[in-house]
Each structure stands twice: as structure tokens, then as C-alpha cells.
Image: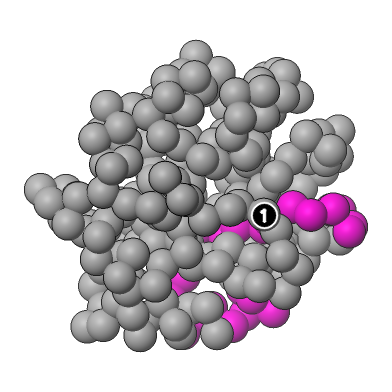
Amino acid sequence: MSRISPTYEPGRVLVAPSILSADFAKLGEELRRLETAGADWVHVDVMDGMFVPNLTLGPPIIEALRPHSNLLFDVHLMIEKPERYLADFRDAGADVLTVHAEACPHLHRTLTEIRRLGCKAGVSLNPSTPVNVLENVLDELDLVLVMSVNPGFGGQSFIPRSLEKIAQVRQLLGERPVHIEVDGGISPKNAHLVRAAGATVLVAGSAVFKSDSIPDTIRALRG
Ligand code: DX5
Ligand code: ZN
């Protein structure tokens, strides 16, 4: 399996379509479509009906999807106590595992464990969570996921205040080779603002899957 490296390259912007907006009855086909269209990563939204008011999918579906794509699987865990399932998601084929700071009382331990399992470690922040929760885990991180909507559903509107927050995270990270991923309400109309603020990975669900041309949309998001 030759998955694209999650290595951070300053100045390079990646596009991670979210399969939350794909046709769940034919996810394998949707993954192949994304790869052909030039997607960099595949963003997989895992929801538990507790941390967020919605349910989606878990390790068995990720495992079933793994042979259908060579792209990096960027797994966004919107679940309480994600430490219970880290090894299951790694075994299923996750490359990046992102947990929510709000769902992890022992964030340092959880991030260390993700890396020990051989995955890249991400932390996500809800719109109301300040960036200073990252201060004591800066060296345990490979990615920070700034939520630009309240997590739980696709198709919501981008919260403008997120732009300032992206810039704050970039400043806090300094020269560390850590991705800043932004998720929620991103489209070709606002992607330039997100990129200019310092994001290096743009997630998009509805903008990609509801577009007339997925390759054109991915190109426009990348800028
Ligand atoms: C929301 C998810 C997002 C979602 C984004 O909780 O984390 O990844 O799929 O969808 P859009 O791009 O439609 O806002
Ligand atoms: Zn997501």
C-alpha cells in the first residue's frame, strides 16, 4: 500500500474531501472517484451520538474501505473517550487519528498512544474551545484540526471567527512541522481566506460531493 505521506510541507495546501457527504450505498466507488479527481487525503468522520448528536461509522467500515483507496485515511474521531478505540482504528487502516480536546481528559497520554501505534496524532478544537488547550501538547502533535462549524453535521455555514483562530494556532505552533486542518463550511468561495490564515489541509464535504465537477472543485480548494 503506497499511501501518500502525511509529512508537513510548508506552503503546500492539501484537500481532504469528507465522505460524510458521499453516497453511503457505494462508498468504495466514491473513494475511487476521489482518487481519480486528485484528492490528497480522505477525511472520515466518526460520530458516536454522544460527543456529537449524530451517528456515522466505525472501524469495520473503514477496514472495508481500505482496499478501495491508496489515499491517506484522515480519521476524525468525534467520540467520547476515544482512547478506547485507537488500536481498532489503527488496525482498520487509519493513518491520521484526530481526537477532540473536549473529549479527552488525558490528552497528552492519548496523543502519545496514537503515535506509539504508528499513526499521526491530531487534536481537534470545537469553535468555542480556546487554542491555549494546545500549549502543553505542542510536541506531541502532528496536526491541529480547527473546527469551523460545530461538529456533527455536514452542510453547515463557516464560522468567520475561525480565521482568527487558525492564525492563532499557527503562531502557537511556531516552526513546528504540524498541519493545520480546517473543517466545516469550506467551499471554493471561502477557501482562499482559510489558506491565507495559515491552513495546510482543507476538509470539504458538501462542496465536493454536490459539485458538478469534483476535480475542478478540488483544484479550486487547493488554490
Ligand atoms: C462535521 C464534520 C465535517 C463535515 C464537513 O462535523 O467534521 O468533516 O463532513 O462537511 P461540510 O464541508 O459540508 O461542512
Ligand atoms: Zn470532520
Mark 1 surroundings within 10 Å by alpha-carbon count, few (fewer than 14), some (14 through 19), many (20 or more): few
Q: Is residue 44 left or right of 26 when viewed as pictured?
A: right
Image position of 205 (left or right of 73)? left
Residue 185 visible in the snapshot: no
Q: In percent of the image, x 33 and y 80: which residue is there?
A: 215
Query: Residue 161, located in which quarter of the rendered image?
Result: bottom right
Q: Please state the horizontal and vertical placement of residue 41, each as a whole percent of the image.
A: 46, 57
Which residue is at the front of the view, 214 or 165? 214
**Residue 62 at x, y = what percent?**
32, 36
Q: Give amino acid for label 1.
A: Thr
Which quadrant does the C terminus fall into? Answer: bottom right
Answer with left or right where residue 106 lies relative to residue 88: right
The residue lying toward the viewer, choosing from 18 and 54, is 18
Secondary element type, mark 1: loop
Classify 207 as above or below 183.
below
Going by the picture, which residue comes out furthest to the top? 84
Quarter holding residue 206: bottom left
Please provide percent x and percent y for residue 99.
57, 34
Note whether 133 is above or below 107 in the view shown.
Answer: below
Please name the residue that numbered disc 1 is placed on. 7
- The percent position of residue 23, horizontal first and vertical second, equals 16, 55
Q: Which residues lie in the magenta part?
A: 172-197
Q: Which residue extends farthest left?
A: 25
- Quick check: can you spot residue 48? yes
